[in-house]
Amino acid sequence: MLEFPQIDFYPLAVVGFPVIEELKEFSITKSDTLIINKNPAPSNFCNMRLDGLSPNIYMFNGKDSLEFAFDTGATKSHFTSDYYLRYKTENERIGKADTVTSSSVGGSTTHQTYVLDSVVLFIGEKKAILHDVQVLTAHMKTFENKYGNIGQDLISQSDKMAMNFVDMNIQFE
């Protein structure tokens, strides 16, 4: 039984990555329907990379293509110190200084952040807007060399999410 009572999160099930990857291509709808495509359609669109067993997604912020950890178990997305440093002047100008406590299996820690009211990201041609994004100012080894961790606040904006492990892409409809 997997529980995260400190954040009131009790998942019904967890499917391991080796099983997910063997599906080759699947979609999940907003109504929690899982669709497994027996014969994945070829695609020339590639925005996913595996880092060990963890999928990463490349998204465009209007200036740059940035790599993020893709964490379907995360309730809310956040940006790392890599993002903070790359856009430091802008983060400090438009963000509000704050602190945030994050919780995971390993416990809870407090971080200095800047909160951005909204951030627009593009996944292919699909536009997503994240609200109240915490930008961490200090380095976290967990998300090393990533610009952030993308969670359910982005995923839930679409009716359907598809992951293709043949052509390495994540798409939202």
Image: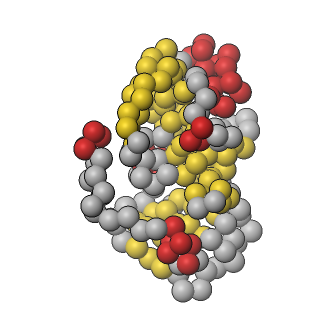
Which of these two is toward me, 154 or 148? 148
Residue drawn at x 42%, y 52% as measured from the top left: 73
Note whether residue 108 is visible.
yes
Q: In this view, does 11 lie above or below 144?
A: below
Q: Residue at 63% of width from left, 25% of height from top?
A: 84
Q: Which of 44 and 139 is in front in this view?
A: 139
The residue positioned 57% from the left and 33% from the top of the image is 140
- Front in this rendered view, residue 48 or 100: 100
Judging from the image, the colouring scheme is secondary structure
Q: Which of 124 and 84 is in front in this view?
A: 84
In the orientation shown, which residue stands out farthest toward the bottom?
A: 38
Give the residue at the far front of this rendering. Answer: 106
Image-based side of 5 in relation to 48, left or right: left
Residue at x-position 71% and y-position 62%: 46
Residue 170 seen in this snapshot = no
Q: In which quarter of the image is the N terminus?
A: bottom left
Tell me: residue 168, above or below residue 25.
Answer: above
Q: Position of residue 164 (x, y in %)?
A: 60, 70
Q: Position of residue 151 (x, y in %)?
A: 46, 47
Q: In this view, does 95 lie to the left or right of 153?
A: right
Q: Residue 83 location, x and y as percent?
A: 64, 31
**Quadrant in the rendering for residue 32:** bottom left
